[in-house]
Image (tube, coloured by chain):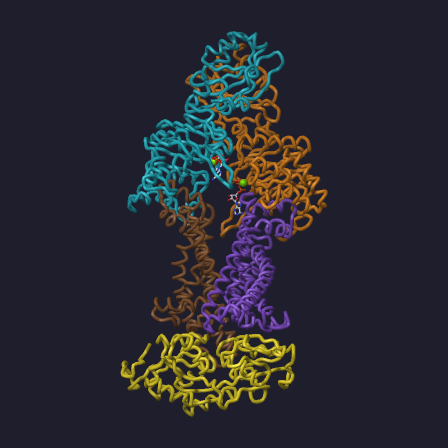
Chain colours: A brown, B purple, C cyan, D orange, E yellow
Amino acid sequence: MGWDQMRPLLEQGTIDTLYMVGWSTLIAALGGLPLGILLVLTDRGGLLANTVVNKVLGAVVNVGRSLPFIIMMVALIPFTRWVVGTAFGPTAAIVPLAIGAIPFFARLVETSVREVDHGLVEAAQAMGGGTWTVVLKVLLPQSLASLVAGLTTTVIALIGYSAMAGAVGGGGLGTLALTYGHQRFETDFMYIILAVIVVIVTIVQLLGDGVVRLLTRRKRTG
Amino acid sequence: MGWDQMRPLLEQGTIDTLYMVGWSTLIAALGGLPLGILLVLTDRGGLLANTVVNKVLGAVVNVGRSLPFIIMMVALIPFTRWVVGTAFGPTAAIVPLAIGAIPFFARLVETSVREVDHGLVEAAQAMGGGTWTVVLKVLLPQSLASLVAGLTTTVIALIGYSAMAGAVGGGGLGTLALTYGHQRFETDFMYIILAVIVVIVTIVQLLGDGVVRLLTRRKRTG
Amino acid sequence: MITTTDLTKVYHSRGREVTALDGVNLHVRPGEVFGVIGQSGAGKSTLIRCVNLLERPTSGTVTVDGTDLTALAGRGKRAGRPLREARTRIGMIFQHFNLLSARTVQGNIELPLEILGLTRRERARKALDLLDLVGLADKARAYPTQLSGGQKQRVGIARALAGDPKVLLSDEATSALDPETTRSVLQLLRDLNRQLGLTVLLITHEMDVVKTVCDSAALMRDGRIVESGVVSDLLATPGSTLAAELFPLTGTAGTGRTLVDITFHGGSAGRPVISQLARDHDIDVSILGAAMDTVGDAQVGRMRIELPGRPEDNDRALAFLRAQGLTVEIPGAAATPGVALSKEGA
Amino acid sequence: MITTTDLTKVYHSRGREVTALDGVNLHVRPGEVFGVIGQSGAGKSTLIRCVNLLERPTSGTVTVDGTDLTALAGRGKRAGRPLREARTRIGMIFQHFNLLSARTVQGNIELPLEILGLTRRERARKALDLLDLVGLADKARAYPTQLSGGQKQRVGIARALAGDPKVLLSDEATSALDPETTRSVLQLLRDLNRQLGLTVLLITHEMDVVKTVCDSAALMRDGRIVESGVVSDLLATPGSTLAAELFPLTGTAGTGRTLVDITFHGGSAGRPVISQLARDHDIDVSILGAAMDTVGDAQVGRMRIELPGRPEDNDRALAFLRAQGLTVEIPGAAATPGVALSKEGA
Amino acid sequence: GTDSDPNSGDDAGSSAGDSQQITVAASPNPHAQILDFVRDNLAEDAGLSLTVQEFSDYVLPNTAVDSGEVDANFFQHQPYLDDFNANHSTDIVPVVNVHLEPLGLYSKSLDSLDGLTEGSTIAIPDDASNGGRALQLLAQNDVIELKDGVGANAVLGDITDDRGITFTELEAASLPRALDDFDAAIVNGNYALEVGLSPDEDAIALEEAEGNPYANFLAVKAGNEDDPAVQTLARLLNSDEVKQFIEDTYPGSVIPAFGTPGA
Ligand SMILES: Nc1ncnc2c1ncn2[C@@H]1O[C@H](COP(=O)(O)OP(=O)(O)OP(=O)(O)O)[C@@H](O)[C@H]1O
Ligand SMILES: Nc1ncnc2c1ncn2[C@@H]1O[C@H](COP(=O)(O)OP(=O)(O)OP(=O)(O)O)[C@@H](O)[C@H]1O
Ligand SMILES: [Mg+2]
Ligand SMILES: [Mg+2]
């Protein structure tokens, strides 16, 4: 296969990947953040300590993380159709990608938020702050750098997952690599695609690391 | 499909899953542990600080974590064949599973080991301990609980990944769910398989949590 | 200003029960600086955390500025609106400062003002005023990591003052600081106490802190208050553990000589008591140990002197000292003041 | 026993240079307890960490027990075998104990013995001996979390002694402990110093620690040693910052009266100096402030007295005091001892 | 969904005049390649705007046609479609046959079926579409015996006599790579070509092209067969150009099998 044929495929694949990963990251962040925070708050000794809710949320997250992604993608088809009107194509692939990434990110959020010094929470409570104050003014700002690091990890995992979007016609670089490299035995093209994926991953990681460094500069001990 | 037909399939699937996940976890642990520790030691300010080695290892781990698993599985076929003599079947599936999980576990090891109080490292150095002493007598024992938690996460991720082992004839529950539930339209059977997966995941998580609790009991602050 | 009645707190952890507070009756008067001392694990932190109900007492009541906080608390574990509002009027400073590293100094001081719902403008004005008050006007835009320990604690104090509290709680606010910085932070607390009429309840394990700023003090042991009162009164109390701890004395008598511990409380210290004793009674007075200081502006302290002759030979000298209004003890005759005695204290 | 020559340490962080040590010449004699004090950031920790080369000095040499450690260190960042072996003979205890929470008390003490390559049997015997020595024989199988702060530090000390060191380094070993526990840990260090002939270099920011156990002391400021020497000699040095910090005095003179600061060093404190002054010169001596104590077994301390009349009227009295071998200063006449003077110290 | 209604053909009024639009779900290989050829070389002249959406799955293309999210699909054969319709209560119908990918049994170590004895290993496709077909091929060649009456849906459990041979199911595209690891493997014609195997010369057993029910066809939801766009695409898929393209691109491994399904 010549470069002339590869180029449009690569371009479209990159666009599809960025499109799917971008949106699903956004949704995973919006879903995983509250879920992760709830996991901390409802834990024993937490501000909203509630063993039942905590165990249920923990179980949901665990099941979400262990279900084979392809199966989840298929099982979600009716839901995807209800949400975006169609169950196939790059837009539709966003739904299972996002839903798969929510429990993944939620666990990372949980770990980050848990690391916030409990003394800061007490300080906010001693000022008369309620749960919202603690979450919005203490837990989130204080764990921001760590949360960004977690989001970077999530984006990279999603780039990996998006290869399976091919099953629902999602396209993207991973699917291209599978189709051309695996099914059409165009090994050279596969390596070029993988190189592009690695470049994207590296850029994401460097960007994420940069933001984390920027946010940590003023931090360390309070 | 009746229970009589399901039962042997389920049994074999469970055995295959446990077999693949068990071995690949073991290998991932043996590979990810040194890799994760090296990531910490070679980092700036570390005992073996070496920016070049650190950046290279970091890049390898990142690429490893972002490559679509199926592609990796296919790309590894010659290697797998060289290692276990065949590239197909449950035994062969262990190779890509383990290699995929090594960078995953390595990152978790890195995080855990980084959390060990630097004062303990200094104490060991002040006693005349070298790098090996620090690693074997301080870093590993002190992060053990956290490492076990990371291993639990890795096992659960591997249970999810092993669904894709079907591509190289690995079998197992995930593949069964895909083949029978999805392709052969035995939806009921699929749900049974998923239930079994969830049960296995839950047992793994509970076991892991139990070990972690046991190891943490005597810990906390030193 | 702060009153606790029969306050108890029992922790349950892993099936074991730990009684951290065992019936504490504390009474802090308006405008005073009240120090609570005691060994590690005595229950000091638990007590102060019960005062603003960060910790729910197991039983007993806490009243601050006339409001029964325990009544406001409600049933659930979460702090309801009335309790949260009461807390905005009680400032608290912490040993490890507990500043938000992600906010500037000004941002940290504005946090309680945000909770109070002030506008951005009001917040900024108030925060800058407070920074002026604690002497950090030029650090408004710095981040906590860029500050020294003492500066961090000043920010902590400014933040605690943001809600115009009448009461300030301080849990080992100076324990992480070096002595010079400790002195300046304590001076600031003393000044605020005077200027703003602030009531301060402070917890410490350093006797020096009590000596330097406290009007009253209490000694805790095993979840109980074993001694408490105005510092100068405590000094006048024979056998007081607190007094002995505040002004420790060392030295033993030669054979056939008399050891005398004298406690000065209030004005008498300025008078030439020892030299008068020597001249009037014509005896050699050896000063073996002495700890004299300024406590809350009064010259106070203790001194261990040695007189020639046995105790019974020195009746006149002792009578002279008592006549000067001093507390006179003969160590060894009564129990030795200090740790051994403290169990009978209060 | 420990000698540093022109020791400097410059940290580079984010383009900025911080000179933590700026030419330090320290000399610790065999068998003495040497205290280094100074404010936060003065460079105390950096100094002690340079002594066993946990931190590589930028320049200068460190000699411990005759061995030039800086020569052993080699080029690279890693510690080579000769340096590691030298370290096994230098014990170190830490402020935050740095015990391995995953090991029992006995296991913690065995760690340095494992590094030395002792057999399991020898390790156990040695560890139990050391636990006996520090008074924790019954805690061998406990985990560090089950111990109090003082007990943890005793384990830290036992661990530091495992390699039979001649030198013990201690970085704020008591700063995390309450005063009573501090006292018992310091007593233990003092006993070990006597029994085993151990040389101890300890770092602290608490004057009390120096008072209680140190034979010699040094004061650090901005990376330099500004004053150092045997404690009793320092006390005899007029204008010594260390002496003033160790025995702080307060009190101001009334008009037309003379303020005199007297320093007692060694035996004279037991003598009835003040009463003799009063009787022989027939004057009223008021004791405004006093800090007298037992330092390394000698009765030492300072006292601020007030004499009637102006300084020139008291020449005879002052001459008498000087004749007793006391150091006499007239505060205000010279510079006030204390912080303001310390820049000229040493 | 685009214009499945025959009367709404020209909504854009573009330069092509009566522009017809159609979206087809297809397996990547060779179906999508054939459609790409049509799109790039034939569709414009015929006034057809063809969108190809690749699916790596064998179930979802039917689901997508049934829901109207794509207009047609091209990846399956009659036995598979029958089974799917029966199981999902769908009504998807074939429009036009295009090609056949004759399954063959290949081996690197054996020259003929005689070599398959007790202890031999054979890899077969793991997907429902090809798995049963592979077992049928083996049964027809007397390598195994299957239960009576199991057609294209045969699974490993339907084997009544395996003659001591071990079977492993693999993803179809992995099978050519598995020839080193198994005594023999069943490989789709198109994949055989990719690794340089010629069905005619290298297969030790091969499906008959004549009367083969496994021709792959264009399929639509029942009722849409006569949609002009569908009809245009059907015509193009059975054109001489496509025949030429298939024969040139997949010599012997993909065989043109034009015509009306079931005929
Ligand atoms: N959350 C808790 N759960 C269980 N026990 C606790 C808890 N907090 C404190 N305790 C116990 O209550 C007792 C009193 O603790 P507290 O922290 O009030 O002591 P303290 O006087 O402040 O000591 P320190 O000087 O070390 O701060 C101790 O025995 C402690 O172990
Ligand atoms: N690793 C480091 N990198 C950069 N600067 C450092 C480092 N360690 C110490 N410093 C700086 O060196 C100076 C001396 O620090 P050091 O820790 O020796 O002081 P210290 O006297 O022990 O203070 P403290 O009483 O707070 O422990 C300080 O200005 C400190 O900021
Ligand atoms: Mg406390
Ligand atoms: Mg230090």
User: In which quadrant will I find the C terminus of chain E?
Assistant: bottom left
Q: Can residue C237 be seen?
A: yes
Q: Position of residue B204 (x, y in %)?
A: 53, 57
Residue nearest the observer in this picture, C223 or B184: B184
Q: Is residue C116 left or right of residue B168?
A: left
Q: Quadrant of the N terminus of chain E?
A: bottom left
Q: Residue at image x 47%, y 58%?
A: A62
Q: Is residue C265 above or below residue D161?
A: above
B65 in relation to B87, above or below: above
Q: Residue furthest bottom?
A: E240
Q: Is residue C255 above or below residue D234?
A: above
Q: Nearer the viewer, residue B69 or A69?
A: A69
> Which quadrant of the view contains residue E184?
bottom right
Where, by quadrant of the figure, is residue C58 drawn? top left
Does residue C75 appear left or right of residue E163 in this picture? Answer: left
**Residue E249 percent coordinates (x, y):** 49, 87
The answer to whether any part of residue E13 appears in the image is no
The image shows residue B171 at horizontal and vertical percentages of: 55, 69
- Quadrant observed for ligand 4 in the rendered image: top right
Number of numbered callouts drawn: 0
Please provide percent x and percent y for residue B176: 51, 69
